[in-house]
Amino acid sequence: MKRIGLIVGGLSTAIASVAALFVAKKSATATKNAVTGVSPSAPPGSANTITLHLTGYWPFQAGLTAAERKMEGAPVDRKGKPLYTAEAFLAGKADHVSLSGDPDIFPYGQKINIPWGDKILVGRVTDTGGHFHGLGKVFRVAGAEPIDVCVESSKTVIPKKTVDAAVIVGDHLDKSSKQLALDKAGKPQTVAVGDGFDLLGAEDV
């Protein structure tokens, strides 16, 4: 009876895992379609709504252990450029907040406007990590794409963990993307077409 119980329990776990993978893949596909403006259909410069599950990371915090420092990463993004915190943006010291997310979904520098209490963070996905892409990707909330917000310290409170954010179609910093980039006036401009993303310098989380 114990063996039968273990088999049944194992089968239930396997079914649950497959179901979770299906939901995760469906969610990721829906997010990618919204980012590219495929579904819902939207021209470059317009906004599509995506559901995000927010967490924070704090690469600037002093006094971290070696393990914590490895988890939080260096204070530069996956292309070696500076990171900017939510606090710096809200204080008017940065024009955007650095976000960590899935590079298979978000072109480098993809713009996302995120509700943050009674404010709106203008974020750009310039960073990534092991929990945000590939086989190690973690969905903590079904149907919500995981995004890490760069903040000053572990004491920073994420006002609302799951939010409906506005992804701006075609507004990114990746010149090799298949999407259209926008010029300074906000008009679509043709860019070179390429495949893949530069993952050098990605956080090990």
Image (cartoon, rainbow, N blue to C red):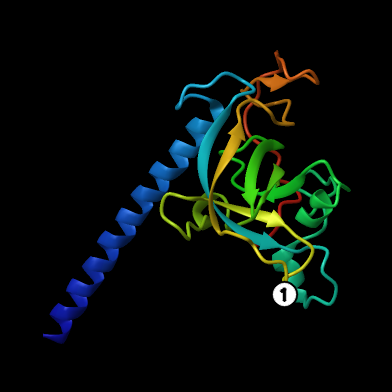
Question: In this view of the protein, which residue sits in the foreground, 27 or 77?
Answer: 27
Q: Which residue is label 1 attached to?
A: 67
Residue 14 vertical position relative to residue 30 in the rendered view, above or below: below
Q: Residue at x 80, y 59 (%)?
A: 74
Residue 65 vertical position relative to residue 28 in the rendered view, above or below: below
Q: Does residue 95 appear left or right of residue 127 in this picture?
A: right
Q: Residue at x 84, y 53 (%)?
A: 88
The location of residue 91, given as percent across then percent down, is 85, 52
Callout 1 crowding tier (Cα within 10 Å): few <14, some 14–19, many ≥20: few
Badge count: 1
Q: Does residue 54 appear left or right of residue 65 in this picture?
A: left
Residue type for callout 1: Ala
Residue 186 vertical position relative to residue 157 in the rendered view, above or below: above
The location of residue 59, given as percent across then percent down, is 78, 63
Question: In this view of the protein, which residue sits in the foreground, 49 or 24?
Answer: 49
Quarter of the figure with the N terminus: bottom left
Q: Does residue 112 appear left or right of residue 145 in this picture?
A: right
Is residue 35 visible in the rendered structure shown here?
no
Quarter of the figure with the C terminus: bottom right
Q: Does residue 130 appear left or right of residue 42 in this picture?
A: right
The location of residue 53, given as percent across then percent down, is 54, 54
